[in-house]
Amino acid sequence: MFSINPFATLSSSVAPIIMQSYVVIMVLLVALGTIYDTIHRGSAKYFFSNWGKAKKSSLRTLGGGEMVGHAVKTAVANVALSSEFCNQKRRIAHLLGMWGFTIYALATAVMVFQYPTPTSPTPAIIPQLWWLGAAMVCIGGYWFWFFIRVDVLAEGGSPFRLMRADMFVVLLMTSCTVALIWAYLQGIESAWANVSLGIYLILTTALFGSVPWTKFAHMFFKPAAALQKRVAIADGSRSNLPEPADKPATLGDPRRHPSNY
């Protein structure tokens, strides 16, 4: 079951070129949606404007080696390990979702483009990674949704309350959930496989087609913002800014004065 490429078995009723075209269209939707989000919200304009202002107030110029070092640290700490999360539960849930989706998406691309039919046998590890990635998304997503969300824990809000900001998480975890259901039904040749496939396609299209209205594009800006912050601290341009509110005040800090409480 876990070693079977569900897309290869689907090729008996859906031509591989159709599946491949669908994947390409989803990639284009993400690219166009991100570009639209950047222009509509002015994210890129604000980012480069802010970076330019920071460079003008920098106390020293960083060398090429230092820039590479900060880029590597950002890639490892902020991207790969999500070190910006202070809450360990949120961090683990985020890592499960992020890395799960990455594994799931890459495995999907390999199965659809490299091994689209039964005549080109798929190495067992590829479908297994696909199942693992989708399962990681589901575990991280449902754990976050029902047990970690702030409004559920602190305000007693219903976990079923949906807001615009929730679209990305909800669509991602439901799409992966239905993907697993479809792969199982496809593997046992159930009559319900086509129904689950239709739902899977609807949710997946909604996920990638709603990029301008969800936090999907946010993942492309976070690493750049984290790198900018590291560079600003290193070149001194951040030295005149107040410390973050969550940083404990030290002895002698004016924030410790009774009048400030």
Image (cartoon, rainbow, N blue to C red):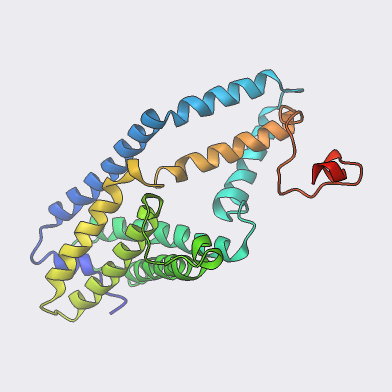
Q: Nearer the viewer, residue 182 or 5?
A: 182
Residue 101 x, y percent position in the rendering: 40, 59
**Quarter residue 217 falls in:** top left
**Position in image of residue 219 (x %, y %):** 46, 46
Residue 171, placed above or below residue 65: below
Q: Quadrant of residue 126?
A: bottom left
Question: Quick one: quadrant of the N terminus?
Answer: bottom left
Q: Position of residue 142 (x, y in %)?
A: 42, 69
Horizontal side of residue 51 vs 188, given as left or right: right
Q: Is residue 17 above or below residue 52?
A: below
Residue closest to the far top: 56
Residue reaching furthest to the left: 13
Is there any visible trace of residue 18 in the rendered image?
yes
Q: Is residue 261 left or right of residue 149?
A: right
Q: Residue 172 appears in which quarter of the rendering?
A: bottom left
Q: Residue at horizontal 59%, vertical 21%?
A: 52
